Image: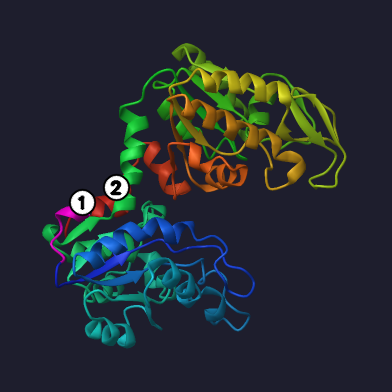
Amino acid sequence: MHISKLDVTGKKVLVRVDFNVPLSEDGKVKDDERLRRALPTIRYLLDQGAGVILMSHLGRPQKKRLPDGSLDVDKFTLRHVIPALEQLLGQSVAFAPDCGGEKSREMAAELNLHEVLLLENTRFDPGETKGDKAFAKRLAALGDCYVNDAFGTAHRAHASTAVVPGFYPASCKAMGFLMEAELRNAQRVLHHADHPFVLILGGAKVSDKIQLIESFLPKVEDLIIGGGMAFTFVKAMGGFVGDSLVEEDRIELARHLLEKAQESGVHIHLPHDVVAADGFSETAEKELMPADRIPPGWMGLDIGPKSLSNFGHVILRSKTILWNGPMGVFEMAPFAGGTFGMAEFVAQATDNGAYSLIGGGDSAAAVKASGSADRVSYISTGGGAMLTYLEGKPLPAVEALKSQL
């Protein structure tokens, strides 16, 4: 169900958001994008006369405990996001120092309509990542209705995302505006793409993108491959890649995918030239060289200008663009040119009427860093969730909104 179909007036609504935001050393929010993307749902519920109870995770506190085995509450507390959230919302936000415990039960019971309560980090309870039903039941008891707007965690079968909804009848649970927008944009490239359609893949590993490639080979005309994963394909074609990142155990698979693409009539575009370096460092010596002629001691860390030009030509003739993964180590200034150049081409194509979907994660960070974020059609907030959905797999959190325990 969509949130607009939910009767929330006079009720308390438990909302799963994704406030897993980057923090500075002193605990301040460095990037408030995920907070901003949750605002439409929160404001809608407040405007409808509801009391809003927010829950989210932050980081992986169970895996990063202190030396004595205790939780690092100071580092992973959601209290850190309160100042930024209050500023964005324009109203005060109460904070419960536990999640589903005695204090959060008291504060949820006392919450007035049009007020907001944020619970402590769901992952402070080990039952969250285990999908524990008892923990989920305690959370579900806090609200009259449930809304999931945390697309970034939709691929996780966790208690707050995939088990809590089961304690609500179908008429009392829904997806929020962000979740709906994410699914709608993903479905556009999956089922309603205009052609020509280009899939742009980058990042480190072929193994991370195998299912995505196989899923989209029947749908696209062009497949652009950059980033570290390109060198596995280059080596599979007999090229010399020096010390570049290669998944040796995936070379045969790369050959298979190249053959499968050819059989499907899909044009594969690999880098012709790369910016190589003699070390993985911003200060390393760098040199432009052919992608298949990299000598030992050197590694490709970005696509070169010829590759960028060729890729750009493909992008500009496309009507649908799906991009997942950067073209190089864009976090290092000397190796950001290829990724930022690709972002500009995607923006230009979008300006000219193409539809462009940026698949979250590093791709989203790269487009934002390039300054082109406001010129693409949609940037996903969930790299892993978007990848899972585009591969054709069900999202546990979405499926849970359709069912009951």
Residue 347's label in the rendered image is: none
Kindly tell me whether residue 271 is visible in this rendering. no
Q: Quadrant of residue 303?
A: top right
On the image, the x and y values in percent for residue 376 come to 47, 36
Q: Which residue type does callout 1 highlight?
A: His
Q: Which stretch appears magenta?
A: 1-8
Q: Which residue is mark 1?
A: 2
> Looking at the image, which residue is at 58% across and 18% down?
313
Secondary structure under badge 1? loop
Residue 183 location, x and y as percent?
A: 32, 43
Q: Nearer the viewer, residue 60 or 198?
A: 198
Residue 226, percent across and down?
62, 30
Against 213, residue 370 (above or below) is below
At x 19%, y 65%, the residue is 48
Whether pointer 1 and pointer 2 mark residues with C-beta atoms closer than 8 Å, the reply is yes
Closer to the camera in the image, 32 or 280: 32
